Image (spheres, helix red, strand yellow):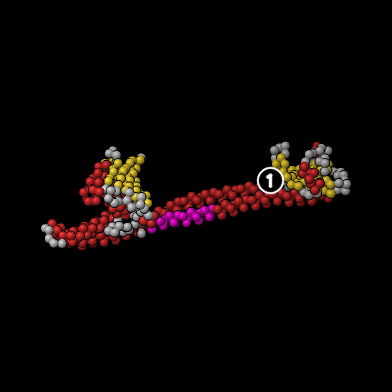
């Protein structure tokens, strides 16, 4: 149940990220489309303006000889807004008329003029003037009596640039808005995750409170009569009365019930951390010596311990010892006679990494995913609280636990703990 609750914040965060991505992509695409449409509208605006001016001037320049320089008057009087210059050419590029009279009679080499005259169609282009200003150019064919002339209308692109400038500002404002939304979304997701994690923790604690009450009742109602049953069974077995084998079963089962009661109390007890300075090698040595004395099976198991003698921790020594004891117990249960259990530790920066590895039966993917669930076990007589207790204690100490295991290849459990416990890191 706690693991399922812990996965909910991840799902909620994933959904919010998907919504942000979809919204951002849609916004960016619409902005790109809007910007391209603005560019196209600006270009079409210049084309329509130039064509309108050319159509208005066409009757005036169709005559064979234009006596007055009407182009100069148009520029001087500013008859149309945005005109840079006007010119009239023959198909060979000879300037017949120009708003700048000094250019009349000169020949230009313009492919666009030739194309407009030969193909009898308007040709649009852009030109950079001697002042480094870029102007929009229309080469417009005029049908005169004797030949085709080409009217060149040059426009300042200021109105179109205003449209483009506004489109760019709009695109930039949308981009800034998207960035702000992402920043807000990031903090919102963190807040939602934190809120749901707190809700999951509260639900877990409520569940643990129920388990704690149940464990307290069990400890009170079962422990005393269970101790009496176990004590009398041991007494009768030691006296050599008949049924010694059956009495041994009673003792063993009573011991198993005692361990279950102790595990329930340990799992449900509030995880108050009492920090003290201790040597990890010495703590591990105590646990291994107790394990050897408690388990008859240990005589048939090889155990290698590689823990540097200079690793010092400031943490809860008893909780660290309980973690090691539970992991060693799991490994003992997993290996067969002649099996190997390896216990190692190293300090990496401000972290202590403890690894317990065995060559036992291993776990499949489903068992690994449920290994930390309360009361889940693959052992015939297991309580299902061993790894759940380890996980709870590791989190209480500000650490984490990871499992690597494959069926038939053994199991490795990696515990990462802070070398110095800090209360603010405890949740």
Please count the marks in the image. 1
Give the residue pinned by disc 1: 158
Q: Is residue 225 visible?
A: yes
Task: Give the magenta range.
Answer: 4-24
Q: Is residue 391 left or right of residue 150?
A: left
Q: Is residue 281 left or right of residue 35?
A: left
Q: Is residue 210 magenta?
A: no
Relative side of 390 to 189, left or right: left
Q: Quadrant of the N terminus?
A: bottom left
Q: Residue at horizontal 80%, vertical 49%?
A: 120
Q: Main secondary structure of the magenta part?
A: helix
Extreme residue in the front direction = 338
| Residue 398 seen in the figure | no
- The residue drawn where x is 33% and y is 44% is 353
For label 1, the SS is helix
Q: Nearer the viewer, residue 317 or 25?
A: 317
Q: Position of residue 79 (x, y in %)?
A: 77, 47
Q: Position of residue 346 (x, y in %)?
A: 33, 41
Q: Is residue 7 magenta?
A: yes
- Seen in the image, is 379 located left or right of residue 83? left
Q: Residue at x 27, y 45 (%)?
A: 303
Depth order, front residue of 394/166: 394
Q: Nearer the viewer, residue 383 or 117?
A: 383
Q: Nearer the viewer, residue 168 or 75?
A: 168
Relative to residue 423, is residue 108 depicted above or below? above
In terms of image quadrants, where is residue 221? Answer: bottom left
């Amino acid at each position: 149940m706690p693991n399922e609750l812990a996965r909910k914040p991840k799902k909620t965060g994933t959904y919010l990220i998907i919504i942000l991505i979809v919204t951002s992509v849609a916004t960016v695409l619409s902005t790109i489309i809007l910007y391209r449409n603005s560019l196209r509208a600006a270009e079409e605006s210049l084309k329509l303006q130039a064509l309108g001016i050319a159509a208005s001037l066409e009757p005036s320049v169709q005559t064979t000889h234009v006596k007055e320089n009407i182009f100069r008057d148009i520029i001087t009087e500013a008859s149309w807004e945005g005109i840079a210059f006007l010119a009239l050419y023959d198909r060979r590029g000879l300037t017949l008329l120009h708003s700048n009279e000094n250019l009349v009679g000169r020949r230009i080499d313009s492919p666009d003029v030739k194309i407009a005259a030969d193909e009898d169609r308007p040709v649009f282009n852009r030109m950079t003037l001697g002042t480094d200003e870029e102007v929009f150019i229309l080469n417009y064919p005029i049908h005169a009596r004797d030949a085709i002339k080409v009217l060149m209308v040059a426009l300042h692109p200021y109105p179109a640039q205003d449209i483009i400038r506004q489109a760019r500002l709009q695109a930039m404002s949308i981009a800034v808005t998207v960035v702000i939304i992402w920043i807000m979304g990031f903090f919102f997701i963190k807040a939602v995750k934190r809120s749901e994690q707190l809700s999951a923790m509260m639900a877990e604690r409520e569940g643990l409170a129920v388990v704690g009450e149940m464990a307290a009742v069990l400890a009170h109602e079962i422990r005393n009569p269970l101790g009496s049953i176990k004590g009398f069974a041991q007494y009768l077995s030691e006296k050599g009365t008949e049924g010694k084998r059956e009495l041994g079963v009673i003792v063993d089962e009573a011991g198993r019930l005692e361990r279950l009661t102790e595990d329930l109390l340990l799992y449900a007890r509030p995880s108050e951390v009492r920090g003290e300075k201790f040597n990890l090698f010495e703590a591990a040595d105590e646990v291994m010596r107790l394990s050897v004395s408690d388990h008859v099976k240990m005589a048939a198991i090889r155990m290698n311990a590689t823990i540097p003698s200079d690793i010092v921790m400031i943490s809860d020594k008893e909780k660290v010892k309980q973690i090691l004891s539970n992991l060693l117990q799991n490994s003992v249960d997993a290996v067969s006679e002649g099996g190997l259990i390896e216990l190692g530790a190293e300090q990496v920066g401000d972290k202590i990494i403890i690894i317990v590895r065995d060559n036992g039966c291993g776990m499949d993917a489903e068992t690994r995913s449920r290994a930390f669930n309360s009361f889940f076990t693959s052992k015939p007589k297991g309580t299902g609280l061993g790894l759940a207790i380890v996980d709870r204690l590791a989190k209480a100490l500000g650490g984490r636990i990871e499992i690597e295991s494959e069926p038939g290849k053994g199991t490795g459990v990696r515990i990462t703990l802070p070398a110095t416990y800090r209360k603010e890191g405890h949740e």
